Amino acid sequence: MTPLQRKLASEQLLHTKNIDFDSKLPTIEADFRSRTVEEIARRAMCLTLVTLKAEGMTGDEVNEFKREHAIEAYLTRAEKKFLGQKPSDEDGEWVWQFEALHVLLWALGYVIELSFPDAESDVGKELEFLRELGPTGFIEGALLRSNQQLLDAADWVFRLHQSVVDERNGTDKISEEIVEQWSATLDWLTREEENWQ
């Protein structure tokens, strides 16, 4: 599929969902880069820990998780700061990271479908993948999506995100927080110079 064909397919998807879109938005894959399974899996482990901490994991449990999964070196500066803090009212902002985790689990083949982001993901169920498999099994059991699947998702979510930001017709039932996390995660998965924020 060419970039233009992908763009048109994404626009058709939005059209079937009765969502207005900006047809002048560009194609997206000029700087495509595919990340490794281990790189994606390590990022998913970091987000699992961040999500658990936001939902009340204690400091001792955080430290144990970091040791068991050997992820200290993969955490961002902001994540390290958050994980070292006492619980606060701001923890709720970090809970949205489970939507980024949802996309990574889809990319790794653990979530079957990346359906439309009009409802929150089942974080409780999805956190079980890592708990059941352990870090080594989680990496070894992953089946990375094809480049085409990653680009297809990145394209339609990019266009949906812009429609939500622009408050276009049909986006009133789409959660901006969810689609923002999905868009940023797919950017990280597919773009050469995109660092995790």
Image (cartoon, rainbow, N blue to C red):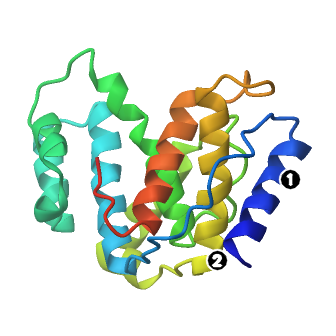
Q: Amino acid at mark 1?
A: Gln
Query: Would you say 196 lies left or right of 155 here?
Result: left
Horizontal side of residue 9 vs 108, given as left or right: right
Q: Quadrant of residue 71?
A: bottom left
- 191 relative to 50, above or below: below
Mark before the other along the chain sequence, 1 or 2: 1
* Nearer to us: label 1 or label 2: 1
Give residue 127's position: percent from left, percent from top. Answer: 45, 53
Please give the label number shown on residue 12: 1
Is the residue under label 2 in contact with that under label 1 (CB below 8 Å)? Answer: no
Q: Is residue 184 visible?
A: yes
* Residue 32 percent across, percent down from the top left: 47, 73
- From the image, tell me which residue sits under label 2: 148
Residue at (72% x, 39% y) in the render: 22
Taking the image as drawn, is residue 175 in sight? Answer: no
Q: CA distance from mark 1 to mark 2?
A: 17 Å
Locate residue 31 relative to residue 122 in the image: left or right.
Answer: left
